[in-house]
Amino acid sequence: MAIWKNGTPELESLSLPQTGTMVDHLGITVVGVTDNSLTARMPVDHRTLQPHGRLHGGASVALAETVGSIAANLTLDSKEQIGVGLEINANHVRPVKDGFVFGTATPEALGRTTQIWSIRITDETDRLVCISRFTVAIIPTNRA
């Protein structure tokens, strides 16, 4: 059973509201959706590397929070509620020096006032790069 409030979203529509944001600057795009997960891709390039030529941990966290936030908000009625980041953690497992990384968000708990999402970030050969847990607060739209 799908978790999305308004049915399975169309991929093209998910990147449009990101224009002019950090998500746009980092080159993050949504590339996959299933009944209970959302996947986004981010390039490993001059925008996302740290000085030693490896993927910056902060860029991984930005990818995790982005895909988790988009997914969380797709489970809500946007006229009534929005999801906002409350807490995020990340364990960086493997370095990446180029190519793309993929963050896949899946829900652990979809509560009335909070949601918890797991985000697995992998490289192009599906090796684990980072694992993150993201907690989302659900607030009324009029408080946004």
Image: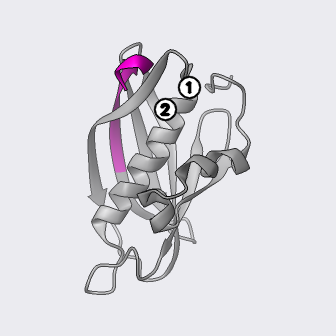
x and y percentages locating residue 6 in the rendered image: 69, 24
Name the residue located 42 percent from the left edge and 36 percent from the top edge: 117
* Identity, as a three-letter code, of the amino acid under mark 2: Ala
Magenta part of the chain: 132-144
- Give the alpha-carbon distance from disc 1 to disc 2, as whole Å: 5 Å
Q: Nearer the viewer, residue 92 or 57?
A: 57
**Residue position for label 1:** 75
Q: Is residue 10 left or right of residue 30?
A: right
x and y percentages locating residue 48 in the rendered image: 39, 73
User: Badge 1, how many Cα within 10 Å: few under 14, some, many 20+?
Assistant: many
x and y percentages locating residue 110 in the rendered image: 45, 21
Asked whether 133 falls inside the magenta stretch, the response is: yes
State the image quarter where residue 94 is shown.
bottom left
Q: Please tell me the numbered disc located at residue 9.
A: none
Q: Is residue 6 left or right of residue 36?
A: right
Residues at discs 1 and 2 in contact (Cβ within 8 Å): yes
Q: Nearer the viewer, residue 99 or 30?
A: 30
Name the residue located 55 percent from the left edge and 18 percent from the top edge: 79
Q: Is residue 134 left or right of residue 28?
A: left
State the image quarter where residue 21 is shown.
bottom left
Name the residue located 49 percent from the left edge and 58 percent from the top edge: 20
In the image, residue 49 sits, relative to residue 92, either above or below, namely below
x and y percentages locating residue 77 in the rendered image: 57, 19
* Identity, as a three-letter code, of the amino acid under mark 1: Thr
Identify the image quadrant of the C terminus: top left
In the image, residue 15 sits, relative to residue 48, either above or below, namely above
Secondary structure of the residue carrying numbered label 2: helix
In the image, residue 125 sits, relative to residue 98, either above or below, namely above
**Residue position for label 2:** 72
Identify the image quadrant of the N terminus: top right
Asked whether 125 falls inside the magenta stretch, the response is: no
State the image quarter where residue 31 is shown.
bottom right
